[in-house]
Image: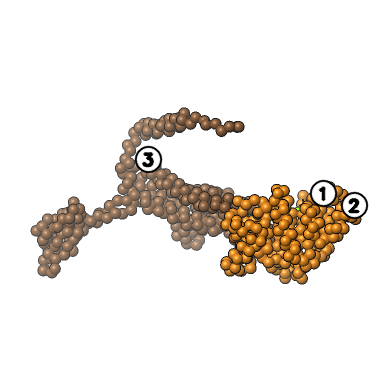
Amino acid sequence: MIEVKNLIKVFEGRGQVVRAVDDVSTQVGKGEVVVIIGPSGSGKSTFLRCLNGLEEFDDGRVIIDGIDLTESKTNLNAVRREVGMVFQHFNLFPHKTVLENVTLAQRVVRKRKPAEANDKAMRLLTKVGISEKAGEYPSRLSGGQQQRVAIARALAMDPKVMLFDEPTSALDPEMVGEVLDVMKQLAREGMTMAVVTHEMGFAREVADRVMFMDAGRILEDAPPAEFFTAPREPRAQAFLKQVL
Amino acid sequence: MPLKRHSVQWPWQALLAVILLGLATGLWVATKRVNYEWRWERVPQYFAYRAEASQTAPVAGTVRGISTDGAYSRVEIVPEDGGPSVTVAVETDTLKVKAGDPVAEGDDIGAERHWKIGPLTWGLWVTIWISFVSGFIGLIIGLVTGLCRLSPNPTLRGLAVLYIELIRGTPLLVQIFIFYFFIGTVLNLDRIVAGVGALALFVGAYIAEIIRAGIQSIAKGQTEAARSLGMSTTETMIHIVLPQAFKRVLPPLAGQFISLIKDSSLVSVIAITDLTKSGREIITSSFATFEIWFTVALLYLLVTSLLSQLLFWLERRFARSD
Ligand SMILES: Nc1ncnc2c1ncn2[C@@H]1O[C@H](COP(=O)(O)OP(=O)(O)OP(=O)(O)O)[C@@H](O)[C@H]1O
Ligand SMILES: [Mg+2]
């Protein structure tokens, strides 16, 4: 479903060069759940943002469901609608109600009829347990509720892949659970997911594979049972010692 | 400040009253000293007045009778050549004939009065529509220029920057002269077109900067969220960025439009009869210099405060989602 070959992303600014993603190659199969962990600044977000072309990378290729993002004839917008993304800070549209947040892209991008889009939105909002807030503006919602709306908004496009960039990091502890529950359900339903998170419990329970990133490279890629009990890399061992 | 204290208000309000009273007295004394005679009663006629149009006899004949109905009188004339009688309606107090009088064709019978709008009303109207039209065009220019200013294309960006700097670095008065005497002559423009054009270009540059700042103030995450849903750059602009930016730029935009109404007074230099020019013209005939200028100022104040009320109301409507 996702294929990455020799991906390189370099940030240049103020005389210093940061290799945020440094020659990364990997694959994610259909229905697989991959959790990416690593210290701050290791390039996790940048890597994830390269997967839907939000970040223009310098070299390598990213192939989503057989479509190569680097090819000049590829319509990036067409690829992006197949790849849902959930952000750390939700990024809901503040001038639109919850319902409109979920219907807007369906109408504009998928050209669905209002009734059809509303229907779909209400079903998804029910699924993430927030249908009673459909008419509210995002500013009236708690962080956990906003993040669940953001997930519904991404799902409304019927994506083939979902990317999560620290979806629970900006939440108060008591709201983390409600968002993780939604994500677990998605994983059970067979969604292909790439998740950057610091929730080790989630990784253990849901992930098919755990990737450990440091300094722009994937240093370890193993099933959670293996990774959490016997990490091979010394830096992964040090990192796990810190967070567990 | 730990506790909210109820500060005593009335001494300050009293002081305010004293200061205002002092200013009013100063004004009064000042006009006394220059021996100015106030003639406020002359002002209303410049808003609207009753114009007299004299009515003449359409045929030669004799006045058979006059039927008076309050302010109006109907004069019935029997023609000499024996045709059917004709009636002429005039104001009673302007009647110049009585029953039995012989009249020749073209003789004055009296006058009819009707309301005509005066130069102040007319000037106010010109000021309002010139501001409105140039503000509207300026808004479009500003929107396009603001977007160009943020465009990744260096040509568009360069042109936008050049235009904005040229306009913001020169006085409006000079721009109006250049527009009228140079561009207006080359393209053979009407003075009104030149005036509106100069104002629109002027305000457009300022609006462009307001729009640019508004767009830049929208968090990057909004664009990223929209793009990650598959929206194109244009769709993102239309549905996500511009609506939010518009809400934010409403207050500075309001200020700009209010400035525009005031700045529009400068078009009077190319002989467009706006409110200011009307005021100047009236003064040459009425000699009520102070009254007319005060009235003109008040009219500007009226228009600008109505506009700011309107925009305030708009702003409150947009605040719904906060
Ligand atoms: N827009 C940018 N311009 C310049 N450098 C950037 C930019 N974005 C990221 N970087 C750099 O790239 C590196 C990787 O950043 P990235 O945000 O991907 O890390 P991360 O693993 O997601 O960290 P965190 O856990 O703190 O979110 C960092 O060194 C960061 O400073
Ligand atoms: Mg990050």
Q: Position of residue B130 (x, y in %)?
A: 45, 55
Please name the color used to draw chain B. brown
Tell me, for residue A234, which label it has, or none. 2
| Residue beneath the point at 64% across and 60% down | A125
Q: Where is residue B5 in the image (x, y as percent from the top left)?
A: 54, 31
The amino acid type found where label 3 is placed reads Phe
| Residue beneath the point at 58% across and 50% down | B322
Q: Same chain for marks 2 and 3?
A: no
Q: Is mark 2 on a helix, strand or loop?
A: helix
The amino acid type found where label 1 is placed reads Val
| Residue beneath the point at 47% across and 62% down | B188
Residue bearing mark 1? A243
Q: Where is residue B37 in the image (x, y as percent from the top left)?
A: 32, 37
Left-right relation of A17 to B212: right
Q: Is mark 3 on a helix, strand or loop?
A: helix
Position of the N terminus of chain B, as image quadrant, is top right
Farthest residue in the top direction? B11
Residue bearing mark 3? B290
Q: Where is residue B110 in the image (x, y as percent from the top left)?
A: 19, 55
Q: Distance between the Cα atoms at labels 2 and 3?
A: 89 Å
The amino acid type found where label 2 is placed reads Pro
Around disc 1, counting alpha carbons within 10 Å, would you say few (fewer than 14), some (14 to 19), or many (20 or more)? few
Mark 2 vs mark 3: give the one in front.
2
Q: Distance between the Cα atoms at labels 2 and 1?
A: 15 Å
Dot 3 falls on which chain?
B
Q: Relative to B13, say whether B145 is above or below.
A: below
| Residue beneath the point at 76% across and 69% down | A65
Tell me, for residue A82, which label it has, or none. none
